[in-house]
Image (spheres, rainbow, N blue to C red):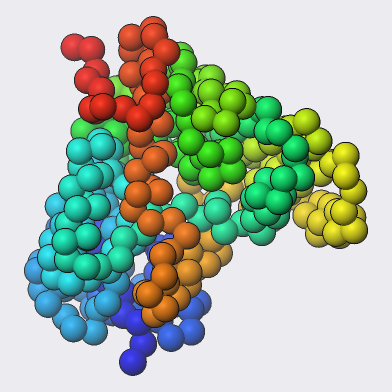
Amino acid sequence: MPTGFGIVGTGMIANFHAKAIGDIRGAKLVGCFNHTMAKAENFAAEHGCQAYDTLEAMLENPEIDIITICTPSGAHLEPAVAAAKAGKHLLIEKPLEITLKRCDRIIDACEKAGVYLGTIFPSRFSPANIALKEAVESGRFGKLTVGDTYVKWWRSQEYYDSGGWRGTWALDGGGAYMNQAIHNVDLLYWLMGDVEDVSAITGTLAHERIEVEDTGTAVVRFANGAIGTLQATTSAWPGLLKKTEIHGTEGSAVVEQDHILMWEFAKKNRKDAGIRKKFSKESATSGGAADPKAISYTGHMLQFKDFIAAINSGTQPLVDGREGRKSVELILAIYQSSWTGKRVSLPLKRDPRRPS
């Protein structure tokens, strides 16, 4: 029997989920659900699955093993809890949810139901980022001193106007950090380790009719003593490729998209030349720098395969629910710092409140 998938929400990102599932041997997209039946039917016709008029009906299908959640960020909780109670494993698009309380309710529901939970972060499956992670874990950087990440993208006013939920606190949960740069927030966490505290400034500089930030800079101090910068914006025309820089007392590396710009270590390795050559070519995709549809679904496919393998082997997936919660917590700390003008320590004791 193939591993059956059901998709909740049939917007843009759901198409990437469907394509990823279609490229996995032994996986099958069985069904989809949208509150607007016509949208579900159009999606089903395009991707060859069954459209459901209620979530409950889709969850009753025994051929569906895994539910992927592709609704707006602040609408992940309710379908996720319902799917967990129905005994379905869950893969949830980033962010896991938009508050810590809502993240914890999803995590608790999955643990009580004994189902697997994963948060979608395809950047962890990029071969260049995997090489970077291996270099960090093997100690090639010496003592880690600086970890920076930059997501300087462009989104038009039309992008925010195209959906009533875009740019709102209630459903987007935030702006450039929570929606766009969260991939690199997660990546920096994965590479550098836990964050001790953060100080940040955010603003809305290039867009109208949105509640959230389109520009921000945060300075973080990691638990290992290193410091770093997280820059996020959707106000940088025409949109640049995202970049991650890791530095230490014995090495430096810079990855732009999936392209290694710098790979230098005090202690040479016979694999270094091959790594530089392998990842020296320009990325074939803009990675969504100016167009959210201009991303590859390869990372999703690799993460789906990892999730299926974890279920079948009884091991943990690379990005589970608690890993997904970390990036939400750091972004909420960034927001709290920007609102209060104070440095904020982690872990957060509660969800921050926006000033009225």
Which residue is at 21% across, 33% downward? 170
Percent x, y of residue 45:
31, 75
Percent x, y of residue 304:
44, 68
Q: Where is the N terminus found, in terms of image quarters?
A: bottom left
Q: Is residue 150 above or below residue 221?
A: below
Which residue is at 18% across, 83% downward? 62
Q: Is residue 107 above or below residue 83?
A: above
Percent x, y of residue 11:
32, 55
Quarter of the rendering containing residue 271: bottom right
Q: Where is the C terminus found, in terms of image quarters?
A: top left
Of residues 208 and 190, the one nearer the viewer is 190
Q: Is residue 122 above or below residue 248?
A: below
Of residues 288 and 21, the one nearer the viewer is 21
Q: Residue furthest top?
A: 341
Percent x, y of residue 56:
9, 69
* Left or right, residue 224 beside residue 128: left
Can residue 108 be seen at all in this image of the molecule? yes
Q: Is residue 326 above or below residue 313?
A: above
Can residue 128 be seen at all in this image of the molecule? no
